């Protein structure tokens, strides 16, 4: 993806947006709503899975037109075509970016690197389905003849967060045939805790690692194998209790996992976009293949929407553009993801990796330092819990933090009296963030409650909410496999569009390498018999030495 001649800041639309933002900064959202009762109609759209309301952003018709011009001038449509055509848009790794192929429900060939990938994709899906059915039917049994009851997924980052997030989101649709466990942390406390409650005779491990070299995953996999072997004693038993997902068959085989238990993925699937591949095996095992297929279907439908809807009615494009407006032209440093649905409780963590590992870059395609912001800090939590924790800052803090509110019309689990209470908060919060409450209103309200004039003046400023805080609202009919697939794909394409406009490489992740390399050098030094590298800076050297001295005591 090299196109050194286009810098976003040189585009006429960027310059136009910069001037326009200077005017918009003096506007208040509540006035924009008061003066135009068509705002919702103009600035919301409906896809087959969700309603997307972006009207509570500090935008006007002019802003929207200018943002769409930016998308056009940046070549978003042509780059979108290149991605779907499997061009090597991941230029620094010289790879295609084809997670969309994994959920392509058409019957057309999917040509990647001169070969049709569809047969291999379908074959892997079929193997996943068969494994799930064998486990569910009880045909697959452990080394002592017992059926499997517990599945432990070992992986980290994209090889953990996607399956974990989806299994949590859809667990109420599962028959709960298996108890799922997820281990990602190299901190032994996590795997020790999981293994403590398990019986090796009835446990299946899924080791997921695209590279099969990731230290955390390999360390946990070896611990799991030792724990298992301590009970089973016979290496042949591993074939009944360990399966793996990787691009690296050689290393998986060297680890001791049987050939027939290796599920393939491909280097054209990025880790943080891989839940659609065999990395989604824990999803298939937990929920059954049909629900996984529904998830793929939902994502595919969003892919079609992204490819065909006009830019002005294109949900991923508008989400990306509003994000660019808030980040680059209004200067907001962070972005919150706030699901009002308990089942989406890992969604913010999952999307945090997807957004920040993809677009947390500071050089453009030409390798030049960029002069504008790329991805903001993306963070979040289940909204209703956040209300009693960090929302104070969202309402009255010195920084304005735009936020995405995600809710559903029907609850996944119906418990009398709960969902309306939840959704009342959902609607109230975006309204409060937008409207605020000014000093006169505060005075009137306090006075109506009989508070003395003197006391009112003491506290009035503390109770003022200036409002004008932008939010997006997503309203799903229900969180189910299809709508979740669509929601995830929506954000994936948002990331893509923003990366194109920012002219950064969204699909590599060199920024996580340096720390890994240094850790590999430091680990042997932590042996008390070894000398600490004298060339370390004084902080790192002293910290290591204090640790080593303390552990000998
Ligand atoms: O360290 C970052 C990263 O490379 C992520 O991009 C990836 O999702 C994760 O590590 C796990 O990598 P692997 O699947 O190769 O173990």
Image (cartoon, rainbow, N blue to C red):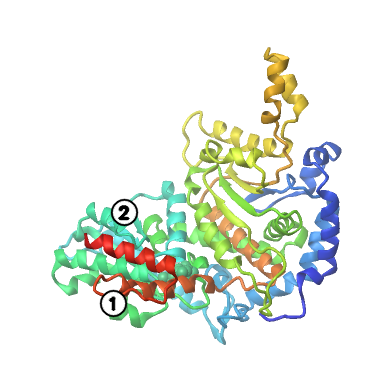
Res. 405 visible in picture: yes
What is the quadrant of the C terminus in the image?
A: bottom left
Marks 1/2: CA–CA distance: 25 Å
Say which residue label 1 marks: 255
- Relative to 256, does residue 495 appear above or below in the rendering? above
What is the quadrant of the N terminus in the image?
A: bottom right
Q: Residues within 10 Å of mark 2 (few under 14, many from 20)?
A: some
Residue 421 versus residue 456: which sits nearer the camera? 456
Residue 136 versus residue 307: which sits nearer the camera? 307
Counting from the top left corner in percent of width and height, residue 64 is at: 80, 55
Tell me the element at label 2. Answer: loop
Q: Is residue 231 left or right of residue 363?
A: left
Residue 370, quarter of picture = bottom right
Q: Residues within 10 Å of mark 1 (few under 14, many from 20)?
A: some
Say which residue label 2 marks: 178
Figure quarter occupied by ligand 1: bottom left
Q: Is residue 478 left or right of residue 10?
A: left
Residue 550 versus residue 201: which sits nearer the camera? 550
- Relative to 118, does residue 341 appear above or below in the rendering? above
Res. 170 visible in picture: no
- Relative to 240, does residue 479 appear above or below in the rendering? above
Counting from the top left corner in percent of width and height, residue 458 is at: 69, 23
What residue is rendered at 76% in x and 57% in y?
329
């Amino acid at each position: 993806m090299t196109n050194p001649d286009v810098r976003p800041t040189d585009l006429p639309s960027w310059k136009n947006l910069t001037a326009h933002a200077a005017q918009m900064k003096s506007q208040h959202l509540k006035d924009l709503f008061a003066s135009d009762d068509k705002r919702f109609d103009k600035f919301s759209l409906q896809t087959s899975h969700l309603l997307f309301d972006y009207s509570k952003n500090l935008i006007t018709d002019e802003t929207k037109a200018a943002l769409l011009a930016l998308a056009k001038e940046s070549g978003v449509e042509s780059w979108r075509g290149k991605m779907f055509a499997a061009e090597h848009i991941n230029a620094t790794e010289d790879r295609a970016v084809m997670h969309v192929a994994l959920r392509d429900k058409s019957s057309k060939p999917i040509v990647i690197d001169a070969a049709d990938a569809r047969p291999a994709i379908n074959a892997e899906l079929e193997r996943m389905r068969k494994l799930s059915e064998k486990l569910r039917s009880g045909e697959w049994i452990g080394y002592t003849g017992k059926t499997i009851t517990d599945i432990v997924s070992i992986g980290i980052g994209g090889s953990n967060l996607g399956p974990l997030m989806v299994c949590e989101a859809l667990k109420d649709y599962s028959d709960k045939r298996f108890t799922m466990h997820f281990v990602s942390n190299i901190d032994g406390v996590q795997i020790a805790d999981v293994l403590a409650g398990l019986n090796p005779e009835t446990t299946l491990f899924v080791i997921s690692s695209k590279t099969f070299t990731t230290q955390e995953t390999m360390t946990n996999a070896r611990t799991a194998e030792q724990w298992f072997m301590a009970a089973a004693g016979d290496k042949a038993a591993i074939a009944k209790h360990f399966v793996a997902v990787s691009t690296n068959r050689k290393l998986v085989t060297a680890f001791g996992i049987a050939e027939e238990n290796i599920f393939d993925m491909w280097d054209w699937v990025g880790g943080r976009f891989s839940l659609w591949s065999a990395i989604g095996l824990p999803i298939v095992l937990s929920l059954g293949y049909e629900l996984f297929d529904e998830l793929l279907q939902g994502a595919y439908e969003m892919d079609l929407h992204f490819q065909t809807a006009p830019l002005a009615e294109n949900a991923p494009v508008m989400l990306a553009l509003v994000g660019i407006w808030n980040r680059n032209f209004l200067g907001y440093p962070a972005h919150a993801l706030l699901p009002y649905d308990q089942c989406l409780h890992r969604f913010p963590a999952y999307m945090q990796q997807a957004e920040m590992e993809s677009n947390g870059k500071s050089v453009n395609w030409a390798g030049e330092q960029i002069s504008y912001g790329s991805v903001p800090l993306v963070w979040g939590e289940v909204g209703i819990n956040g209300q009693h924790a960090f929302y104070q800052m969202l309402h009255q803090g010195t920084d304005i933090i735009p936020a995405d509110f995600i809710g559903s019309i029907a609850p996944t689990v119906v418990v009398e009296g709960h969902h309306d209470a939840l959704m009342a908060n959902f609607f109230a919060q975006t309204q409060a963030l937008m409207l605020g409450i000014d000093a006169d209103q505060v005075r009137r309200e306090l006075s109506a409650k009989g508070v003395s004039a003197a006391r009112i003046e003491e506290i009035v400023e503390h109770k003022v909410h200036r409002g004008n805080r932008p939010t997006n609202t997503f309203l799903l009919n229900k969180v189910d496999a299809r709508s979740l697939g669509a929601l995830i794909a929506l954000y994936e394409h948002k990331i893509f569009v923003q990366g194109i406009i920012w002219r950064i490489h969204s699909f590599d992740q060199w920024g996580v390498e340096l720390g890994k390399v240094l850790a590999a050098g430091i680990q042997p030094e932590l042996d008390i018999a070894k000398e600490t590298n004298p060339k370390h800076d004084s902080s790192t050297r002293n910290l290591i030495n204090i640790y080593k001295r303390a552990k000998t005591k």
